[in-house]
Image (cartoon, rainbow, N blue to C red):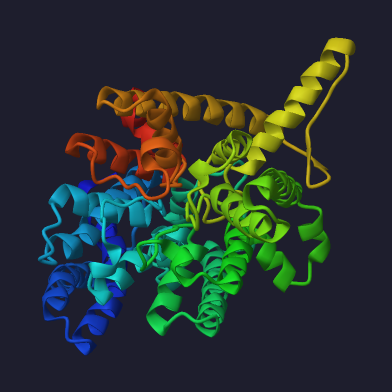
Amino acid sequence: MKPLVLLRTLILLLGMVAAIMLIPLIFALVTGEGRMAAAIGIPALSIIAAALPALLSHRKAPLRFRPRDGFLLVFLTWVYMSLLGSLPYYFSGLGISFTDAFFESACGFATTGATTITDVESLPRSLLLWRSMSHWIGGMGIVLLTVALMPLLGVGSFQLVKAEEPGADKERLTPRIKNTAKVLWLIYCVLTIVLAILFRLGGMDTLDAICHSFTTMASGGVSTKNTGVAWYNSTFIDTLSIIFMLLSGLNFNLYYRITRGRFRDALNNTEGRVYLGIFIIAAAAVTISLVPFYGSVGPALRYGAFQTASILSTTGAAITDYTAWPAVTQVILFCLMLCGGCSSSTAGGIKVIRHVVLWKQTGNELRRILYPQGVFSIHLNKKVGRKDVVYGVAGFVFLYAAILAVTALAGAASGMDIFSAFSTAVAVVGNLGTGFGSIGPGHNHSGFPDYLKWFYSFAMIAGRLELWTVLVLFTPEYWRR
């Protein structure tokens, strides 16, 4: 990729983020938060000023690049986007170090419910809004947003979308990728608005309702309150959170099909059925194990269903200290941390479709032992799946395990106990944020050494981009002409 083309495209993508930053800037001006207005406005307006010439020059020289260039561009976009998003934290005057500021920003765009901030409620309201918005932007992906609103990337746009989220089986819903992006973002916006209205009706003030709808739909998990949604002590709000956390973890392609009246396609979707089945079975098991703990079914169902939905969708929110629950319950939740949501959703983790593929392939291998001459295929959505999908999934799961091992090793080297190190690795790479041990409910990442925060920041970005996009850049073959 030519350096000038790379730079111009990168500036355009960052310009989209900077344009969105104008919303918390206006909020800061309206509410009289002068220091935050400067902290947000100076970096945002500077990037917009740099992006305008790139936008104007595009009309004379449209952007064109090879498919493989999309991986480098998306990775750099996520890194520099995190850098841009960190500046409001760093210049806020709250004493947030640059390392912590970058960590917070990376958590936002990677939709990881981790934080280094001990007292969230002390933050300026405009910074809380930006914190939640960064999760919301990262949820659907800035590349999808840019393609939806500004068809600037020409024939290379689909390559960027594939690089941003290279799932097990990427598909187009409409003939043109920009139309696909617009449809997905429209669905995303509608669900967010509906949830914000319902949160407001449930007792939240307007800003809290907006912020919580942003982070819930993005599977982000952060809150404007130190104790999260538990602060409201509302069964209605908890139930809303459960429903929309599950919705955020579903494949957004299904919503498109439903809006087009293709209900049979949604009902036949293998991944969606397994995802909801996992939730129902896990929530029932957790609830049953919690009945003796709480003494009745009501609280057991409320807390059990919430934590099951939160961890399965990789939202990472908590309304109680689940580390005090019975051991069998904690084992179930830990297994869910290794599951993840659906492909083409805002959730992180390994993703349900990959578990389905491996499970079906395991069955085929067992049958092959009994019938050596037999020919067996996996079936997805009541159709025969491609053989190369199995290879891709197997490679991804092995790579995922290797990254978890390296990340756990980094945590252990800093002095963590082995369980906390592995739990943190799963939470960081899987974009959950919260977990067990030293990052359980009531804990945060503020006590980690700076080098570990930087390592975790890039691990979150790699996890958000599903590993391939980042790690392919470290192969010699990528840089060969």
Picture quadrant where residue 309 is located = bottom right
Q: Decide if residue 213 is on the left or right side of residue 276.
A: left
Q: Residue furthest front?
A: 295
Left or right position of 247 against 383: left
Q: Residue at x 27, y 72 (%)?
A: 21
Q: Nearer the viewer, residue 28 or 201?
A: 201
Location of residue 211 in the rendering, given as x and y in whole percent from the top left corner: 40, 72
For the C terminus, give its image quadrant: top left
Q: Position of residue 367 (x, y in %)?
A: 85, 18
Does the image show residue 472?
Answer: no
Task: Look at the image and tell me whether residue 466 can be seen.
Answer: yes
Residue drawn where x is 74% and y is 26% of the image: 361
**Spot occupied by residue 296 in the image (x, y as percentages of width and height):** 70, 56
Residue 273: horizontal and vertical position, in percent?
76, 50
Given residues 67 and 276, the one toward you in this image is 276
Q: Is residue 332 above or below residue 218?
A: above
The correct choice, above or below, for 76 with respect to 401 in the image is below
Q: Would you identify the image quadrant in which residue 109 lies? A: bottom left
Residue pictured at 71% horizontal, 45% vertical: 278
